[in-house]
Amino acid sequence: MSTAHEGEGALGELLDPELPAATYVLEPDVVEPLTRRIVTSHTAGTHRSTLPFTGAPLAAFPLSSTDDVAAAAGRARVAQGEWARTSLHERTAVLDRLGALVLERQSEILDLVQMESGKARRSAFEEVADVAMACRHYAVRGPGYLGERRVPGMLPVLTGVRVHRRPVGVVGAIAPWNYPLSLVLSEAIPALLAGNAVVLKPDPQTTLSSLWVAELLQEAGLPDDLFLVVAGGGDIGAALVDHVDHIAFTGSTATGRKVAARAGERLIGTTLELGGKNPLYVAADADLDSAVPGVVRACFANAGQLCMSIERLVLHERIADAFLERFAVAVRDLTLGTGLDYTADVGSLVSAAQLERVTRHVDDALAKGARAIVGGVHRSDVGPFFYAPTVLDDVPEDALCAREETFGPVVAVTRVASDDEAVRVMNDTEFGLNASIWSTDVARARRLAARVQSGTVVINDGYASAWGSAAAPMGGFKASGQGRRHGREGIEAVTEVQTVAVQRGARFGLSLDTLYALGGETPSRVLSVALGAMRRLRLP
Ligand code: NAD
């Protein structure tokens, strides 16, 4: 990608706070081919996005109107009819090529994702890896998930029944800004493989990354109009719900509720991947050598702007002090930076709004008596929206960050006296997206996992082992969502189930009609005898 950048450097090299951390420019020959892909009639104005690393303007592009959303859904519907008739083999080949291309062209999307979201490159790479894993998984297992299933019929031999998975039609995807590559393709890959078309409404801040995905899908061989992008904010997301056959929404719980209500009016299916307040428990027998770096990653990957990120650290009192001493050192050692390279551990927050939210949560906790063991400060010396990785102790129950999702680099410590208390604390939240347990006794950790109300529970890791296992469903209990992405569940969500039942007996004179023609009580008697025999034979 023809990006020019200078002044790369990690924390500490920028002595003059007036200096922009770096200057990154997206050249017109990069931006224009991408923005031409937006479905727009150029009547809804222009959006100007910002480079989080410096706060400077990044790109301008036309927005879509609500009529454009209807037009996009119409085009997608036409293309979908044809696509659904292609063989699974053809569709799988597109995924295979996509998985190879995303690895080959990763430097382009890594730059773009970093420039739009402000994240560190290693967090951007997690997106590339997720897409490669999802492509591989669905290319190998997808056809099996979609294959027809023979099930026992009403009467053995006389009834033949098969269950089919049919595409729902047009899937509307609404995505947030925090993982603009992987969250977009997590929805699109199974949807397209199942024979659907996708209309995507990305967050305005990360629209270019989504348009790059559209380009990549085309290069992978996806026919026109099967993956269309509309640009805009909440009004355009809401309009999308009105024109599609299923909504795959990823974002906050507050918006998810609105989307679910609107989808409910239309009786269309939804997959809702929402917020979390994820706990991590370090048990008394945890191996602190591996726990310390693992917990640091669990809390501060993507500057905490990861739905599976840990915001509540639950420590067994026997190891709490020893753990915190080492944890604080490791958190202080994290480097913040703006480089389009792998030098920084932690990047910027995405926007002034995110910075305001994080600052408000931390300041509120400190005002109510919490103590910052590490961090608790805005790092404007690195960039306008950087915030120091922060560990808070003694956070009171009524602090905002005790219950609400902060979605930033902030973790609050709670000490517990037993595993039972740990489970109670972990479950004491309206959310249930991800949880983590650290213990050298995996069998015990598994027993605890069974008591934790969370869509994923990761043992001796924060999140990657669950997220990266594309065969395993991922999603939320309670207010963290409905439905799952990844695995069988992720593709079944974008299909309708159809039962095709064949009455076979007619050609032998044994149809239901011949039975009912016997008249009177005879049909009921014959059927009762047959049902009794089936019960005794334990036929399903
Ligand atoms: P958000 O809810 O503000 O926005 C998400 C998307 O919804 C954006 O594209 C936005 O434009 C759109 N939108 C806003 N109002 C809408 C409406 N009324 N109808 C339809 N669409 C509308 O969320 P955000 O702040 O961008 O993202 C952060 C949130 O996303 C956090 O809560 C985070 O936990 C969550 N998240 C969850 C997962 C998951 O898999 N569970 C993954 C990533 C992020």
Image: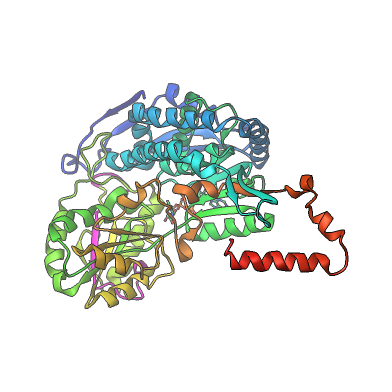
Residue drawn at x 53%, y 28% as measured from the top left: 90
Please indicate whether residue 192 sits to the left or right of residue 1 in the image.
right
Q: Give the image location of residue 449, x and y in percent.
A: 33, 66
Q: Is residue 421 magenta?
A: no
Q: Is residue 486 visible?
A: no
Q: Residue furthest top?
A: 29
Please indicate whether residue 431 sits to the left or right of residue 286 in the image.
right
Residue drawn at x 14%, y 73% as measured from the top left: 318
Q: Give the image location of residue 289, x and y in percent.
A: 12, 57
**Vertical arrangement, residue 396 with respect to residue 161, above or below:** below
Q: Which residues are magenta?
A: 381-402
Q: Give the image location of residue 177, x and y in percent.
A: 43, 45
Please indicate whether residue 273 sits to the left or right of residue 509 in the image.
left
Please indicate whether residue 161 sits to the left or right of residue 24 in the image.
right
Query: 520 or 215: which is nearer to us?
Result: 520
Q: How would you classify the magenta stretch by its main secondary structure?
A: loop
